[in-house]
Image (cartoon, helix red, strand yellow):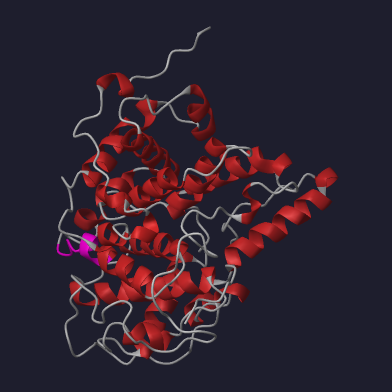
Amino acid sequence: MARPRTRSVARMEATAAAAAAAAEEEAGNPDGAEGAAVVAVAPEAAAEGPNEPNAGEASREPDAGQASREPDVAGPSRQPGAAGPSREPGAAGGPRQPGAAGGPWQLVPNAAGPAVAPYVEDIDRYLRSLEAEESRRPIVNYDQEIQGGHINMRGKLVNWMAELVYGFNLWDNILYLAVSYVDRFLSRNVVNRERLQLLGTSALFVASKYEDRCHPSARFFSSITADTYTTQQVVAMEANILSFLNFQMGSPTVITFLRRFLFSCRGSNRPINIRLELMCIYLAELSLLDDYNIRFLPSIVAAACLFVGKFTRNPNTRPWNLSVQRITGYKVSDIEDCIRSIHDLQAGRKWSNLRAIRSKYEDDAFERVSTIPSPNTIKPSFLRDLKYVNG
């Protein structure tokens, strides 16, 4: 069954905020950042469950206790795309075709709207300040510092989550948000290995509520673990996540910045370079697998994906120029470490055994960008900072 053409809560909030900003220009209130709405909730309310109007309502059902079977995050308990619980309206089905509503390179509606144009720089500054807030940043080495090194399953968990998001036709933004919730939660809460899959499942549940009006139910997310976890356990972990996040669910992610960079690089009068944009988005999803990339701000990862994507498409042309540097706000030296990390992921030098994202982008619908080879090394001259003519 075809997926209904819904718009995410985040996009609606962004569009509404942009319209309000245009109407109140004299008041100087340009707060129209994509997916960055934060609802302040009292701690006692957070303990009861999510009360944000657009995030859905968490059930107040008691935790049913530990699951009787140990989960395996190496792969989904149900094959994505197989028959699953019905959704209202519509049902989770096969892959969404690129270019359809919510397709991988469809930019956020407020990226180029005339009402938003005067506030683009303000929005960008706001997003960059938001991504750097300590409460929204995970601890770089949380596996060792917080979890005691006993988890070491993050890559497999993210691979499993990516397979579910694609196989069950969920919004692409859901994966990025859910992974950020997992990293932030694990940075300050000890979670044993047996409950790691539950954390990933509930993170997807929370992110889907934030992004999609027609989000799946808690029962749906329980079923995709082959009922390893009950509906009550999914809901209980959801409440824990929301309480910990203090309902700050709308943080900017890699895809937030990448879409803005791609739109700005494209320009208003130039045709879409679909293969380049899909390549960059593929690299952005790959970046989620490697916990090394946690150390970088989302905007840095987005800029590095743009660099490697442009390099892959045209290996003999310098990927970075002054225009791209101005758009992203980064010199090559600012993102060089991240560039090497993304390039290693693309070349299969890291996490090559995790196939969900690579397999997704082998499909003709995604221009088979994961099969496009990239040179093994990047020319040293490409990694040098640009020299200004009048500098």
Tell whether position 151 is magenta. yes
Residue under the point 55% across and 46% down: 127
79 lies left or right of 271? left
Q: Please state the horizontal and vertical placement of residue 353, each as a whole percent of the image.
A: 15, 58
Which residue is found at the position 16% from the left and 82% from the top? 70
Relative to residue 261, is residue 171 depicted above or below? below
Q: Seen in the image, is 33 located left or right of residue 235?
A: right
**Left or right: 353 in relation to 229:** left
Q: Position of residue 249 (x, y in %)?
A: 50, 64
Q: Nearer the viewer, residue 108 or 22?
A: 108
375 vs 330, nearest the viewer: 375
Q: Residue at x 28, y 82 (%)?
A: 225
Residue range (magenta): 150-157
**Where is residue 309 drawn, in percent x and y?**
36, 40
Magenta highlight on residue 96? no
Asked if one can make out residue 155 in the rendered structure from this viewpoint, the answer is yes
Residue 241, image quadrant: bottom left
